[in-house]
Image (cartoon, rainbow, N blue to C red):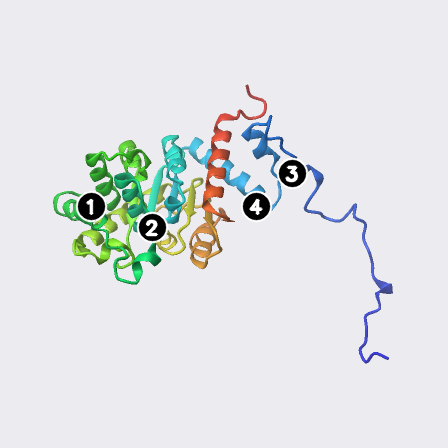
Amino acid sequence: MTRYKRADLSGIKTISIRSRKSNVTPEQFARPFDGRTGSFAEFAGSLPDVLVAKDLKALVRDILESRKDGKPVILMMGAHVIKVGLSPVLIDLVKRNIVTTVAMNSASAIHDVETAMWGKTSEDVAANLGDGRFGMVRETGEFINHALTEAHRESDLGYGEALARKLMEASPRFLEHSILAVCYSLGIPVTVHAAIGTDIIHQQPTMDGAATGELSFRDFRTLSECCMGLSKGGVVLNVGSAVIMPEVFLKALTVARNLGRKGGRFTTAVFDMNVHYRPSMNVQQRPTAGGGKGYYFTGHHEIMIPLLAAMIQTGMSTPKKGTR
């Protein structure tokens, strides 16, 4: 005999499935896609209207509506985005006038410069760390640090502008792959946000802390100004930055609101391979708490970002129902 009392289920009251609220119906299901005959638009339309796929479609609509209404789309990014080969995809979004501001950590700027100047980036850390050679490439440190020192001494340029101008002057073989240079040439704000001590160029003798700090501060003010437009529309994308850009964005948004731009109701989205605390709180949740939408997409950048970009481009070229 058991020692435990068990609930008697004979008195349970059941309900009909016809009256029960349900979240999924066959209309939301995915449709098989024939890659031999179908277009990408048909593939995008075949995705299920459920969970993250539904969120991704909604984000694309928000981006397109924001640009239609003249609202900003701010792209914030970490270095891994460049290391996995996504610069051409992001540059295309800039050229299509979808992305209106690019803000990156300073590691991203390093990869951007190395790619443009020498056609290679992403050092093998393990191979060089043991004997103290990690991060000691002379050309990278000299190019970036000298550009910042010169701009600090002679101009009012920010970090992103200073590097972009130097790249344009050098006109290297791979310049077309530089997000910095393309933004600068098109007049799109491109900002770089440094945390001193985090990057390889900070450990070299050409490093100037005053120049690095001042130019990064100028870029913080530029990003704060760009956040002024986040009211009743606009989108902020944080791709692959777990700490620096979420922290910088929260402060830049606070500056914009403190200076009188109290509006909300904009959209934020995080793209990363894992869920992190700061992007969750400082990008997805806190900025949109007063009215807005925040999304978090987990997955590899080299898959998710081309998918997002292709869906945006498809939405730009696909007429709405009832139009020709």
- Residue 228 versus residue 32: which sits nearer the camera? 32
Neighbour class for label 3 at 10 Å: few (<14), some, many (≥20)? some
Is 291 placed left or right of 28 in the picture?
A: left
| Residue type, mark 2 in image | Ala
Q: Is residue 241 above or below residue 183?
A: below
- Which of the two discs, 4 and 2, labels the residue nearer the N terminus? 4
Neighbour class for label 2 at 10 Å: few (<14), some, many (≥20)? many
Give the residue displayed 50% in from the left and 34% down from the top: 311
Gap in Å between the C-alphas at discs 1 and 3? 50 Å
On the image, numbered disc 4 is attached to which residue?
52
Is 318 placed left or right of 24 in the picture?
A: left
Residue 207 in which image quadrant: bottom left
Foreground mark, 4 or 1, reads: 1
Placement of the C terminus among the 4 image quadrants: top right
Is 247 placed left or right of 277 in the picture?
A: left
On the image, numbered disc 3 is attached to which residue?
30
- Which of the two discs, 1 and 3, labels the residue nearer the N terminus? 3
Foreground mark, 3 or 2, reads: 3
Q: Position of residue 177 (x, y in %)?
A: 33, 36
Q: Is residue 313 above or below residue 294?
A: above
Placement of the N terminus among the 4 image quadrants: bottom right
Is 275 placed left or right of 154 in the picture?
A: right
- Which of the two discs, 3 and 4, labels the residue nearer the N terminus? 3
Give the residue displayed 72% in from the left and 48% down from the top: 21
Foreground mark, 2 or 1, reads: 1
- Which of the two discs, 3 and 2, labels the residue nearer the N terminus? 3
- Which of the two discs, 2 and 1, labels the residue nearer the N terminus? 1
On the image, numbered disc 1 is attached to which residue?
143
On the image, numbered disc 2 is attached to which residue?
252
Foreground mark, 1 or 3, reads: 1
